[in-house]
Each structure stands twice: as structure tokens, then as C-alpha cells.
Image: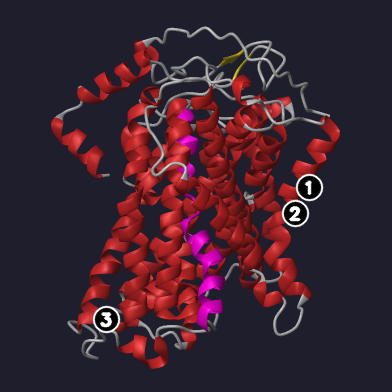
Amino acid sequence: MFFREKKEDVADVSIRPHDSEKVEEEYMYSTTMGPGSITSKHTIDLQEGTKRGLDARHVQMIALGGAIGTGLFLNSGGNIATAGPAGAFIAYCVIGFMVYCIMTCLGEMATYMPVSGSFNHYATRFVDPALGFALGWNYWFSAVTIATELAAAATIIKWWQPVMPDPAWSTIFMVLILAINLVGVRLYGEIEYWFALVKILIVIMFIIIGILVAAGAVGGAGPTGFRYWNDPGAFAGGPVGTVSVLLSAGFSFQGTEVVGLTAGECKNPTRTIPRAIRNTLWRIVIFYIITIFLIGLCIPSNDERLGDGEDTTTASFTLIFDIAGIEVASHLVNVVILLSVLSAANSALYTTSRTLLGLARDGNAPAFLGRVNRFGSPFWAVVFSSLIGFACVFVSIYSAEEAFTWFLSITAVSGFISWSGIAFVQLRFRRAYVKQGRSLEELPFRAFGYPYTGIFAVVLTILIILGQGYGAFAPEFDGVTFATNYIGLVPAIVCYVGYKLIRRTKVVPLLDVDFETGRVTDLDVAKDTEEIGHLPWYKRALAWIF
């Protein structure tokens, strides 16, 4: 077994002074776990070998475009067909607000304690090692997201009727993504910066064209207004249709938590991460809410191209350009969507490998997965995470479309479990923090609406997870649908129960929670503020906007 023995007394930790001249190469904050740590019986540096290679511009753009991928480009049209324009709009608003609440919860912990492994490490330290183990491996299991994106990429390429089969394309993309993540976080950040910029530009372009189509300025069909809200109707499938879209809408937002996982490898995290979190709300409104609203205005929910046919996954964006009479642009749109999907797969490999790194250094995964190469990349964790992507490539030999459907269901449930865990862990983080008599003023960032928003997020995610499989029971039980909807629950349950039975861990007492190891200090906050303040005014302005 690779589980390390746990102890419940808090480590005595000394804060190491950071070397300002090596801020790009070394971890700034004290992360040494002492012999009495709740997470390890040995002295271990949680960030040993990792590098702070992500600039503020990288983090801001990753936060801005990190979640713009398969869910938004390829699944939004299907959501309109399932729930109708009003139903889909309501679902996206509800999920969008919930995601914002969860992001502020993650931001509070990530800015106070910026370490790799992020929320699974927080769960181990603030709640129960069994919960940290379960959340970490559940999130790693979402590496199936890589396969989701690769299956989607193969489906997109079919639009051009290529010669090579789907698995060949998926394999090529997987190798490229693996190479990027092995080189180091700096290359990952730079590539994601430009990927995100392309995605943002295409969404902005889509919004402009969508407004023109709805207003009748292009397309030749006159203004659509709310025509399709009346015929075929604002809702499709009634309340059941709207509820069923909540899960797939949630998949569209998955990836927003990536910014929290970058805290361990970004410069000036006490300033960069809070800014990225605060800007989450308007990003959600612009890139998700407005987008789904415009799709509902421009395309009727009963349009067969939204729900059937081999090229339907690209319909929600590509069809808008076709309606506008810009047929040549369809090729460009598909190229951009392909790049966006590959970006999402790239981010998925990054996050799952860092999750494995955190698990290994918490003693919840084989120790070799915690090793890093000279570039600061956890190479064994990257390779191990990529294996599931390669394995799932073979599943797409049967059908890329079928594989996409299954992978979507698995990763969506896994993502909701992670979100629920983030909100729950933050609730206990704050309880323990206050219980120990610590001042809230020392927190670099505080979650919005505590504790109500956290409770709201936990309750809603659980309700969605349990209720999204309603279709498997009505009008009669369907075993395949049931398995598709709930298979994502299995890894988390097995990991939690198995760890509990084997290790017999207990919930960490509030007064024993370790708030010192890896935390930021007033000196860290002052230094981050000073370094940001030395930037030219135009860079500060761009950083605030993006």
C-alpha cells in the first residue's frame, strides 16, 4: 500500500524567507511538512522541484478561456434542443451562479495556501484524509475529459471528410498534448494563453454575428427577435427538460477551477488568483449566458441539426455563420473549435497530473508520481494521466460519437463531485479558521456570501448528481441510461469507503487543523503587491481587464 501513516497533531513550521531574485524558479512560500503533520509522518516539501513559471497574463487568460471548450462549442446546441431556449437559458444562469460561488470558495483557500494538489490537499488537511483521497482520485478520474476532447476532435475533423480514421487523429493529438505537458508549466501557460485568446475572439465574433442575425441585419430572414420562443416554444420537455440540461450545462463550465490549481505554480498568487476569481462572474455572463441566449434567438429548438446528424456537434456555432450567409467562415469556425477542444484536453492533462502530484506528496499515491523533471514538470504524473487518454482512444474505434456521449456523462458527474467537495471543504476551512481565533483580515481573499453560497453550491450539486438520471426511470427503467448517468459516482464512493475501511481515519478536529504549512505571510502579500505595483500602467490595466 502507498498510504502513509497519519497523525493528528499539528506540525511546527518555520517560514522560510524567499529569494526575490529566484521567484521564477523557486516556490515562494514555506511548504515543508514536519514530522507531526496531518498529511505526512516524514518531512516533505509539498512543492519541491516545481517552478513558478506562470505570469499574471497566463493565469488571467487561463481563467478567461480555460473552460471554453467542448461543452460550450459542441454541446450548447443540444441543450437548446433538449430544454428549449428559455429552459437552457435558465439552466445556464443557475449553473453559472453556482460556479461563481464555488470559485470564490476555492479562491479563499488557494490564495491563503497556494500548493499543488489544491482542493484534494485542502480536504486532507481541513476535513478528513479519506475525503482528500477520494476527491483527489475522483478528480484524476476526470482525466477521461482528455478522451472526451479527443473524441470531440475526431468528430470535428469528420466535417472535412478526412482519410484517416478517428483513432489515428486522437492518437496524434494525444502525443502532442503529452509532449507539451512534459516540457514544463511555462510552455503550457504560453500555449494556453494563445489558445485562450483564439477562443475568446471566436466567441466575441459569434456574439456580434448572433446579435446581427437576431436583429435581421444579416441572413436575409428579417429580425428573429423572440420568434422561436413562441414557435416552437420557450421550453422543450417542460421542467424535466430544464433539469436534465443542468448536468450538461455544468460540463460546459467545467475547467473554471483550473485557475485554482495553478496557484502552486504562478507568480504573485495573493494578487493574481483573487483578480482571476473576481472576474469570473462577468466572464460567465459574457461567454456563457449571452452565448446560449443568442443561440436560442437564432435557431429554433426543433431544428433537426441541433440533435441529429454526424456534424451536429458543431451546429450551434457553425450554423449561426451559415444563417448569416458567411459559409466560407464555417471552415474557420471549425478550425477554431478544433483548437479549443485541444486546449481543453491540454488543460485536462495539466490539472490531472498536478492532482496526482499533490496526492503523491500527501502520501495518497505512489511516491514516484511526486517526482519532477528539470523543467519542474511532474513527468511520471503526466505520463500516468495520459495513459487513460490513450486507453480511451481505443474506445473511439467503435464510434467517436458514442464515445463522446459516454465520456461526457462520466466527466460531468465527476466534475460535480469535485465542485461539491470544494464548497464543503471551504465551509470547514472557515469554521476551523475562526475556531482557532484567527483574524479574517489575514485572508488575502474571502469567499462571497459565506456560508450561504457554499451551502447553496453543496446542496445544488448533490441534487443535480442524484436527479440527472431521472430519464433512466421514466417511463420505464433503462439499464444503459442508468449506467451512463451514474457511473461517474463509482470512483469517488469506492475510494472514500475503501480508504475509510483500510486506514480508519477520523475527521480532523477543528482545533488541530494545520493552517501554517504552506500558508502565505504578510511578507508574501506585501511582496506580491509591490511586484504588481512595479508593472507599467498599461500592463496593470490589461491585467485588471483580463
Q: Are marks 1 and 2 in contact (CB under 8 Å)?
A: yes
Q: Quadrant of the N terminus?
A: top right
Please name the residue that numbered disc 3 is placed on. Answer: 324
Label 1: few (<14), some or many (≥20) within 10 Å? few
Label 2: few (<14), some or many (≥20) within 10 Å? few
Q: Quadrant of the C terminus?
A: top left
Q: Are marks 3 and 1 in contact (CB under 8 Å)?
A: no
Tell whether 226 sits left or right of 349.
left
Q: How far is the residue under mark 3 from the one under mark 1?
A: 50 Å
Where residue 201 sits, quadrant-wise, is bottom left
Which residue is at the front of the view, 228 or 77?
228
Question: Total of numbered circles in the picture?
Answer: 3
Q: How far is the residue under mark 1 from the one under mark 2?
A: 6 Å
Tell whether 541 sits left or right of 243.
left
The picture places residue 172, in percent across and down from the top left corner, at 58, 54
Please name the residue that numbered disc 2 is placed on. Answer: 490
Part of the protein shown in magenta: 238-264
Number of the label disc, if any, that sits on residue 494:
1
Secondary element type, mark 1: helix
Q: How far is the residue under mark 2 from the one under mark 3?
A: 45 Å
Magenta highlight on residue 458: no
Where 536 sits versus 345, above or below?
above
Q: Main SS of the magenta segment?
A: helix
Residue shown at 47%/19% (left/top)?
A: 27
Residue shown at 71%/55% (left/top)?
A: 489
Secondary element type, mark 2: helix
Residue shown at 54%/58% (left/top)?
A: 460
- The amino acid sitting under disc 2 is Val
The picture places residue 470, in percent across and down from the top left corner, at 66, 73
